Amino acid sequence: MTDENVNASDGDSMNSNDEALCEILGIPSLRVDFDEVSETEAPTARSLDELIRMPDMEMKNITDRHGLRKQYESQSYCIFPNELSVPSVVMRRLADELTWGGDKVKADKSYESIKVIKNGELIERRTLTRFENFVNHHDDWIKLSRDYVPRLISAALQIPFVLFKEKLNLKPPGGSGFAPHADGPSLRVALGADGPQTFLTVMVAIDDMSIQNGCLRIVKGKWNESCACPTVEPEEGGSPDAGGRAGAIRMNAADAMAFEDITVVAGSIVMFNSWVPHRSSANRSPFPRRAVFFTYNPAKEGDFHDHYYAKMTRLRDEWRFRAGAGLDIGTPDYVDELKALETVPTN
């Protein structure tokens, strides 16, 4: 069956009233563009345990053969080859166990009000959109984030790394994107000079990432602290997840940058440093676009994962107290947590 036939079939099955309402409101169609995802071959079918058992020297040989260190040093990002990818079925299982596991896996949860179309009407629905601080409470997430991935990036860069923080973005249909920003300034806010100063982030795609569903977009280049894009000063006393968060890039500056779409298949691993300008658009597809982001720091700078989340919990509690919210993290009424960087690109 051709893609054209697939799209035609999908269109025939859609509610015409929903499609008409989409057009009236300027909301993108629910149709799926199957040609947007990179034509890169699907990741290998190695199990997570097989990947963990992979010798460090084999990892190094593969990363050296593909020139990942050179690419990372010259462009501040790289995509690991398929033979090192995590099977998509594994990533989806891990995400599902976190999403549907109830209280079995402890995690900090964030919600977003998302506009959806139901029975021809536009409604707002409170939707779970993000998990943080969860890897310590799930064996396979520990294996992935504290064993396989840090060994992988250490093999590529020949520097030992430890986990600093993690987040899993669910990005459901209609879910917001993120405005242009760099991670470096915000990663230093919680601990300041007492914590790590050097970071990189590893994204593992859980679903295929396309332009339509709001894939990661980056500006390639030799980015570092001395050669970084100017960012907006955070709002004094603002939410550590919104106005008080450092690292936002002004839209007029971002508009002059050449952002490139990182379209990859599920299970792919992408690494970029903390000074890379990046952004994403809203999810205009009818399916989730999930991805997990692990942030690491060099092992020589110390292991601050638990200390970081303890401090962030305190900063969030203090902000909620000042704002008069008085609510607990994870409750649906947590004043639109992570409605951060609200200027979301729509193109």
Image (cartoon, rainbow, N blue to C red):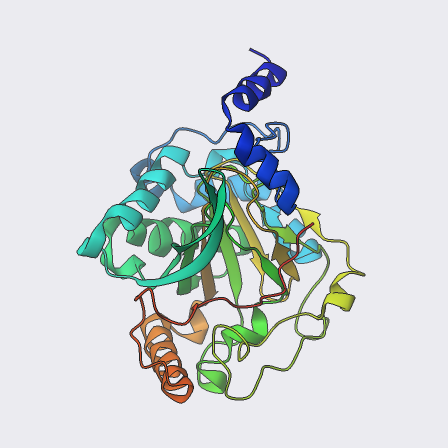
Residue that sits furthest to the right in the current view: 256
Q: Nearer the viewer, residue 159 or 224?
A: 224
Q: Nearer the viewer, residue 104 or 177?
A: 177
Residue that sits furthest to the top in the current view: 1
Q: Position of residue 239 (x, y in %)?
A: 47, 79
Q: Position of residue 75 (x, y in %)?
A: 69, 54
Splitting the image into 4 quarters, where does residue 87 fall?
Answer: top left
Q: Nearer the viewer, residue 328 or 160?
A: 328
Splitting the image into 4 quarters, where does residue 185 fall?
Answer: bottom right
* Quarter of the N terminus within the rendering: top right
Q: Nearer the viewer, residue 210 or 282?
A: 282
Q: How many marks?
A: 0
Q: Is residue 13 left or right of residue 78?
A: left
Splitting the image into 4 quarters, where does residue 94 fall?
Answer: top left
Q: Is residue 129 left or right of residue 270?
A: left
Q: Position of residue 54 (x, y in %)?
A: 37, 40
Q: Position of residue 220 (x, y in %)?
A: 71, 54
The residue at the point 51 percent across, 78 percent down is 188
Q: Is residue 48 left or right of residue 116?
A: left
In the depicted structure, whether residue 288 falls above or below residue 200: above
In the depicted structure, whether residue 337 falls above or below residue 117: below
The residue at the point 54 percent across, 39 percent down is 285
The residue at the point 42 percent across, 51 percent down is 149
